[in-house]
Image (cartoon, grey):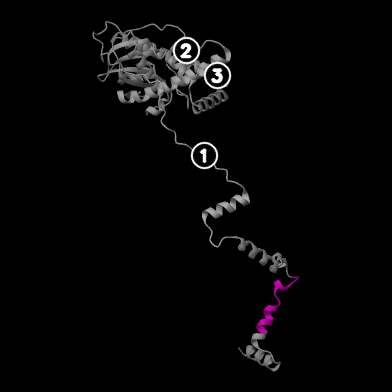
Amino acid sequence: MKVFQSLCKQLSSKGGSVEAAHRATFSTSSYSCGPRKKNPYEEVDQARYSRVVRSVLACRDPVQTPESLLEEDDLLFGPVSKGKPPQQDEARVPRNWFPIFNPERSLKPCTEPAAPLKIPLQRNSMPSVTRILQRTMTAKQLFYLERWKQRMILELGEDGFAEYTSNIFLQGKRFHEALESMLSAPGSTNEGDENLLHCGYLRSVQHLLKDVRGVCALESAVQHGTLKYTGLLDCVAEYRGELCVIDWKTSEKPKPFLRNTYDNPLQVVAYMGALNHDANYSFQVQCGLIAVAYKDGSPAHAHFLDSELCSHYWAKWLLRLEEYSAKDKKDKSLDGQEPGACEDAAGAGAAFPAGAEGSPPPTH
């Protein structure tokens, strides 16, 4: 404190002050070293700039409106390129409607058949249901199918992938043959058969078979004379009291929801509509069932389609038919060849192995 007081006295005797000393102390700052940096904005001719601003503002209307702003933008930047807003996908309806149900037929056979009907498939110029669905797959379905195929080829190689798909379809074929044998003559199957006991697909559907009664048709061909297509259905039988077109599917992946079955509902209603108007059958069917069996033997998923749901998918099937017809006419006009003949169901689905991610399951 005494040192500070003596310092103050010295400054006072020299005509200075503490405040002056304080300012002097901070006058030697590092910011004062070297020449000061020029601000580029200081080089702008402020008077000229002010005149320009005033002249621009003088040309404007006193009050800006949305219309005047658009006119100004149009002069400065040119006309606006207006793109059309994305249109909502309207519900498409078939141009040529044909009913799925036949009011002239009863819902059940007049007499119980001694054996299930097995109408042989006739090869003719009519396309099969499977061919129509494959030819009218969406771009998204094709993308996922090709991506899955390339991934499998990368993992297994070309030969390994061919062997994999061959084994998948062979297992599916044997599964259908075993089901046909069991449903043709219930109780005749030897439960001790080692092959059947080790078939995971058959174990998977055991709980569903308990609810299947009154088998009317097995591996039987149907043909729609008016809409010009044919197919080979798996089974027509009662499931929990409702007469159904039953489609047995195999899969390595769970399909717990109907949407997981891709185009299978369209396949079922296509068979149904053909059966209901095929002279080989004296009855009609108004319900469907998609039964998905699993290789590991886990309980199969059953997707039941009532008459309302069948009508919904029937409209979609008619649209696919129209799309196929348009593509078929275009192809014929380009090469002058006849359209492909009907394939049998066993070979038509060879491009779609069961359980393939993003791809429709095979016909069998």
Residue type, label 2: Gly
Q: Determine which residue is flagged by label 1.
A: 84
Query: Residue 244: x percent and y percent?
Result: 31, 18
Q: Nearer the viewer, mark 3 or mark 2?
A: 2
Mark 3 lies on a secondary structure that is: helix
Disc 3 and disc 2: Cα gap in Å? Answer: 20 Å
Residue at x-position 54% and y-position 19%: 161
Which of pointers 2 and 1 lies earlier in the amino acid sequence? 1
- Residue 350 falls left or right of residue 272: right
Residue at x-position 67% and y-position 85%: 20
Residue type, label 3: Gly
- Residue 96 falls left or right of residue 72: left
Q: Are marks 1 and 3 in contact (CB under 8 Å)?
A: no
Disc 1 and disc 3: Cα gap in Å? Answer: 49 Å
Binning the other alpha carbons within 10 Å of mark 3 as few (below 14), some (14 to 19) or many (20 upward) gives some
- Quarter of the figure with residue 288: top left
Please name whichever residue, 238 or 25, is drawn nearer the observer in this view of the structure: 238
Mark 1 lies on a secondary structure that is: loop
> What residue span does the magenta drawing correspond to?
21-35
Q: Determine which residue is flagged by label 3.
A: 160
Residue placed furthest toward the bottom: 13
Which of pointers 1 and 3 lies earlier in the amino acid sequence? 1
What secondary structure do most residues of the magenta stretch adopt? helix
Binning the other alpha carbons within 10 Å of mark 2 as few (below 14), some (14 to 19) or many (20 upward) gives few
Disc 2 and disc 1: Cα gap in Å? Answer: 45 Å
Residue type, label 1: Lys
Q: Which mark is residue 349?
A: none
Q: Is residue 7 visible?
A: yes
- Residue 113 falls left or right of residue 166: left
